[in-house]
Image: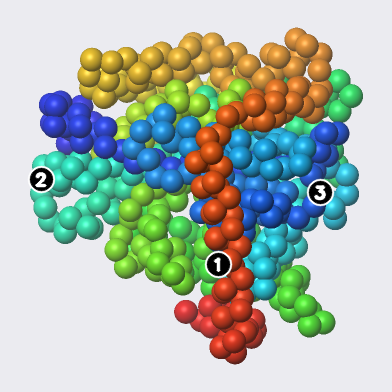
Amino acid sequence: MNSFDQRLNQLASEDGRKALLGMLRGIEREALRIDNAGHLGEGAHPEALGSALTHSRITTDYSEALLEFITPVENDIDTLLTGLTKTQAYTVQNLNGQMLWPVSMPCFIGDVKDIPIAQYGTSNAGKMKTLYRQGLTHRYGALMQIISGVHFNFSVSQSLWDMLYEASDKQASRCDFISESYLGLIRNYRRLVWVLPYLFGASPAVCGSFIKDKETDLPFKKAGKGTLYLPYATSLRMSDLGYTNKEQEKLSISYNSLNEYLVGIQEAIKMPSANFAQIGVKVDGEYRQLNDYVLQIENELYSPIRAKRVARSGEKPSQALARAGVEYIEVRALDVNPFSVQGIEASQIRFLDLFLLYCLLTPSAKSDEVDGWELNQNLKSVVLEGRKPGLELMRQGKVISLEAWLTEIFEQLKPLAHLLDGEGHDYQSALETWYAAVVNPDNTISGRMMSQMLNQSVDHSCWVMQLTQGYQQQMLDYSLSEQDIAHFQQEAKSSLAEQAAREQEEVANGLDDFDAFLAQYMQD
């Protein structure tokens, strides 16, 4: 098995550089709608934004108030970010004065009953999406579900796969080689995922209203009127306060092969849960959740990374993977960057490119329970106290300081950055930017946030509102071309027409029996 350095040497040519630079990326960015007082934005998903069920770029996540912006797949980073900016600008310009909350942790929340679940119309698929979210409410509470994040979709070029496959022993088919290579990337990523909340974590503090009566043993400090924070935290979004699921701890999802992964997923969506059974599925004629298994559907699996393939109509994610293998991976460990109007900036994307290529090209041993325990402990340590001086992690049973481990990783990324840059300096510059956060934790995103809040003696919510208002004006002033506006208006119109057509077709063909639809979906 070739080492990372050996694989990099094999690619150290102009053809290799072009193959590496053929990466494809997509971004999914979530943002809450809020009013001028910093409260959750009221009202249904604006009609000017089209149908949340069928629009390709503007949809909703858990709540009507939780918008999600989806970019097309792009090779060029500037094109990717410009497209995201245009989508956000068009949205803001059609929110009737409402604004986008530019951080992961929610704004001031009064009564959780006021958090509206997303609505997707009267088609069976639309009803199922809403019911799935109803189930999430009963299972985990609404507050957890309105935490925002950024998902980064990533794949490498077919020419790179050609070169890597030619250099392999070719014992597997090319399709299987690609899938197993992506699974190797995932295993390495899971071992090193703590790097991302350390550098990019942006939720070291929360508004006190988020905690409310929730029991927590975290040693919060209080600042201002209602800000709760941990002195060295990086990403409370990824702690037990955020996207975690105790029920899923009993699952055994293996990433050692695609087949093992798919078997684990199938077992998970059929595994009974005593706790969720107490909720009931259909009570007094009203559904409360899709089912009472540990997972209602595959999307409920909370994982910092997923293996993905674009699914065909009516196809489940695992069915798509079983049909044709892994096509790309989805990074899910990113907080919304409050220092960027898009929620993510170009230097982060370039670091992610380097990091994910490193995970792909580095030999990846199979994972076991000890490995799983280590990666969970390391991630927990970093999200809660990643900026703590002298913090130590575990690597293959041995203690190593976070700074020493990060320094090693950055050293290994340098020749890759140099190769990708050619005559330029973009990747090397990105590496230098984020290495400053290794040398001084105050240069991490979470460190910058805490420095500003504490130095200005301002509450978390007030600090975020200042950013919100600045970005609001920036997006209102953003000049969309007549062609851009016409495109968004046409897609809004087309998406609403498509949703209506689906609903009418089901009624006309006698297919609007939701009970029968759900039973069939769960059976497939």
Mark 3, residue position: 42
Mark 2 or mark 3, whichever is nearer to me: 3
Point out the tag, 1 or 3, that comes first from the N-terminus.
3
Assess disc 2: are there few (<14), some (14-19) or many (≥20) residues with their C-alpha within 10 Å of its C-alpha.
few
Q: Position of residue 212 (x, y in %)?
A: 85, 42
The answer to which of 12 and 343 lies nearer the viewer is: 343
Mark 2 or mark 1, which is nearer to you?
1
Residue 337 appears in the rendering? no
**Residue 256 shown left or right of residue 404 in the figure:** left
Q: Which residue is at a point 48% across and 12% down the rendered structure image?
A: 436
Query: Residue drawn 14% across and 41% down?
Result: 163
C-beta proximity under 8 Å, tags 2 and 3: no
| Mark 3 element type | loop
Callout 3: 10 Å neighbours few (<14), some, many (20+)?
some
Question: Which tag, 2 or 3, sits closer to the chain's start?
Answer: 3
Q: Quadrant of residue 469?
A: top right
Q: At numbered mark 2, what does the secondary structure look like: helix, strand or loop?
A: helix
User: Label 2, label 3: how many angstroms apart (C-alpha)?
Assistant: 56 Å
Report the disc number at residue 498. 1
Question: Residue at 40% across / 53% down in the picture?
Answer: 307
Res 18 quadrant in image: top left
Quadrant for the N terminus in the image: top left
Tag 2: residue type?
Answer: Glu
Label 2, label 1: how far apart the Cα atoms are: 45 Å
Asked if disc 1 and disc 3 are in contact, CB closer than 8 Å, the reply is: no
Residue under pointer 2: 166
Give coordinates of residue 143: x percent, y percent: 76, 48
